Amino acid sequence: MAEVTRLSVARRLDRCTVLGPGTRAVIWVQGCPLRCGGCVASETLPFEGGTVHTVAELADWLDGLPGIEGVTLSGGEPFSQAAGLAELLDTVRERRPGFSAMAYSGFRHEALLRGGPDRRALLRRLDLLVDGPYVASRRHGLRWRGSSNQRVIALTGRYAHVGAEPDSSAGVELSVEADGSVSWAGVPPTPGFREGLEERLAERGFVLRTEERREA
């Protein structure tokens, strides 16, 4: 019997327009070996926690989402689960051949190219990569990234045009769930965004959801 590949996921979002081109799904993986000061998703850093999904479960989820052109992989550090994510992209593309893929990584592109076969395999399946660690002292309101040392790298011709488009913040999006919990996605253009948002939401009785709900 073939081994079942599993991924540890911190959170998922079925529609997002501020983390990559067009309308995309987003998967935040759980676990990151880096500790960038001021990380806006600190709850995704520990490798403990998260919700475990099989590749097949995540592929079914992505395949069932209408009106999206691809997925953005964030975290956490996607390249810490590179083999499973490469398998996920292959599985989805068997059903949706034009499905695009973008990923964030705290590692530089050059370092990933020198990495192991799993990391290189994931790189080969990406159309876009945002690379490099977040550096709080170099924060700028840039498109899809938090600090000016980070780069948006087109790895295929699909999104080669993004380098010629305006390099300004795409903003953030808020989602309100039926139970009143709130989640957000995007790259905050200003420091202290998350702390201020949490305070204002708490004053109004909303709870910020930062983890994926576990199924009973």
Image (spheres, rainbow, N blue to C red):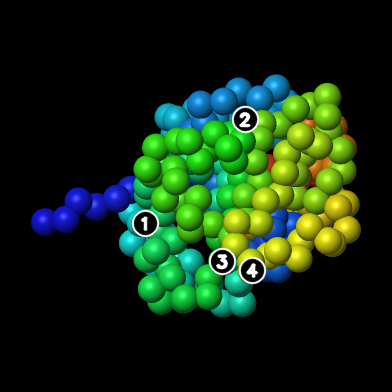
Residue 106 at what x, y percent from top left? 61, 34
Mark 4 and mark 3: span between their CA atoms? 8 Å
Label 3 near label 4: C-beta < 8 Å? yes
Identity of the residue drawn at 61% across and 77% down = 67
Tell me whether the residue at label 2 lies in contact with that at label 1, contact meaning CB atoms closer than 8 angstroms: no
Horizontal placement of 125 versus 133: left or right?
Answer: left
Numbered circle sitting on residue 42: 2
Viewer-proximal residue among 48 and 4: 4
- Mark 1 and mark 4: Cα distance apart in space: 21 Å
- In the picture of the structure, the residue carrying the numbered disc 4 is 158
Residue depicted at x 66% and y 35%: 132
Q: Earlier in the sequence, mark 3 or mark 2?
A: 2
Q: Which residue appears at 57% of the width and 25% of the height?
A: 34
Residue 90 picture location, percent across and down: 39, 64
Mark 2 falls on what kind of element? helix
Quickly name the residue at label 1. 87
Q: Secondary structure at mark 4?
A: loop
**Amino acid tagged 1:** Glu
